[in-house]
Amino acid sequence: MAAPMAAAAARAALWAAGAAVAGPLRLRAARFPGSRWNVSGSALGRILSVPSWCSRSSAALGRIPSVPSRWNGSSSALGSLLGIPAEAPPAALGQHPPPVATDKEEQKRLLEHRPDHPPQPRVLRIAIIGAPNAGKSTLCNQLLGRKVFPVSKKVHTTRCKARGVITHEDTQLIILDTPGLTNPLKAKRHNLDEAMLTDPWDSMKHADLVLVLVDVSDHWTRNSLSKEVLRCLSQFPHIPSVLVLNKVDVLKKKFLLLEIATDLTEGIVNGKKLEVKSSPKQDSRSSVKLPLHPTQASPPGSKVPGSPCGQERNQAQEGSGLDRSSDAGGAGHPLGTGEGPEHHGSKDLKDMKGWPHFQEIFMLAALRGEEVDTLKRYLLMQAKPGPWEFHSEVLTSQSPQEICDNIIREKLLEYLPLEVPYGVSQVTHVWEEGECGELLIVQSLLVPRESHKRMLIGRGGKVISRIAQEAGQDLMNAFLCEVRLKLKVEVKG
């Protein structure tokens, strides 16, 4: 009994020491990073010649300035494209998140523990949806600062919804990581549970904000949202939505980001019309020179009066390919009150490629962590007054066994070909802490065929050894303790 308590105390001391080194971070609206539309002092604001009084025009936001759709921060893909000078990166948020408890009962007690929220707590529930393999779990891990969700290049790595918790000062963000939106035919092909079809919809019911993640490196799907995503957005039109373009570092022709964003938004963001005037001859090595032509826009369903920033019609400098027209409504706070977008029927969705009611656009590279903190700061500022749901030491709603199973399944998906990993079952035989505080895990991997067993073991046991080694390393990072993982491969009886 003394050894587990000593190990838990050591993990807590390690986490506290790291947090003390990082020091407290004071979030100030005036230092919010990233190129922003209609915000004075920002990179794109300078390009569009926005006057300084615009940033103070939104009285409804109080101490937080209005931050309409922004095309990523400086030193980013689009920032370089528009010739925006690089700026020193701000201090990172959440560098030392709490570890996950290694004991199931300890984690259960922590989840049931009364939240230790401050006198004036703020909270925001965020649903992340998108097509399979768009990078949702990768983004969740980067936002949390610790890997607790499985990540793989193959589709349907996430099998059920799980919650991640970010607690920063007086604010708590609850991230609802969901399986990729799919249809019954694909679910049957991959032997997926019914929860894979219903979990994303259930998460939307409890969300205050939805992030729609799109993989811009996939040239087959990047210019249109899937019908499942459009149906989900249309079913919950009252929930503010934000478009997140992921994997921008992989895209070689950076000027395509403007066209992709225009297609996915139907040319309207936050009630403002966008226009991209493409040149006949575009080259990925040259900067984009797209003139700005202000036009009137009347997007459907938005009736919230705009801020004075939206009424500016100053012509942009050469190199900007964004057309921000005069106000067409909806330029207020993304989570503010208003009538919201209208509901789209099934006939309308057939003709739609994008969603014209996005409040914001972010461009980032989740795998490399580029511009993730910009998105995180934005989410912290969108939080509303309300009680926390979890104690500040909670990082995820998953049990330690669930994290272990998911991490091992991630490695199976990575190292086994085709449909083989989807038929593997996992059975844990040993889960205990040793005398020195190390975590001992023994798990059996059950496969349907002898050929799958040979494939999983590999020549000389190299495949199974690599899986155990890499999974053990990830578990050490999640639990902040030494992990000894042993895997056995058996054929199902």
Image (cartoon, grey):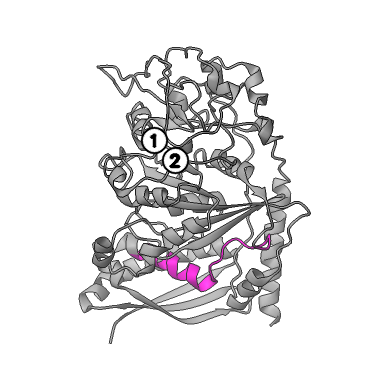
How far is mark 2 from mark 1, CA to CA?
A: 8 Å
- Figure disc tally: 2
Residue drawn at x 43%, y 18% is 320
Q: Is residue 163 visible?
A: yes
Q: Residue at x 46, y 41 (%)?
A: 341
Foreground pick, 301 / 365: 301
Q: Secondary structure at mark 2?
A: strand
Q: Is residue 473 left or right of residue 386?
A: left
Q: Quadrant of residue 355?
A: top left
Which stretch appears magenta? 390-412
The residue carrying mark 1 is: 265
Residue 390 quadrant = bottom right
Q: Earlier in the sequence, mark 2 or mark 1?
A: 2
Query: Is 89 in the magenta?
Result: no
Q: Position of residue 429 (x, y in %)?
A: 46, 83
Please, which residue is most extreme toward the left here? Answer: 451
Quadrant (top left, top right, bottom left, bottom right) of the N terminus: bottom right
Q: Pick whichever, 10 or 493, lies toward us.
A: 493
Foreground tag (2 vs 1): 1
Q: Which residue is mark 2?
A: 243
* Residue 391 placement (x, y as % from top left): 68, 63
Few, some or many residues within 10 Å of mark 2 (<14, 14–19, 20+): many
Residue at 63% in and 49% down? 94
Residue 100 at x, y = what percent?
Answer: 59, 65
Front in this rendered view, residue 284 or 71 = 71
Q: Amino acid at mark 2?
A: Leu
Instruction: Tell me whether circle 2 and circle 1 mark residues in contact (CB < 8 Å).
Output: yes
Q: Amino acid at mark 1?
A: Thr
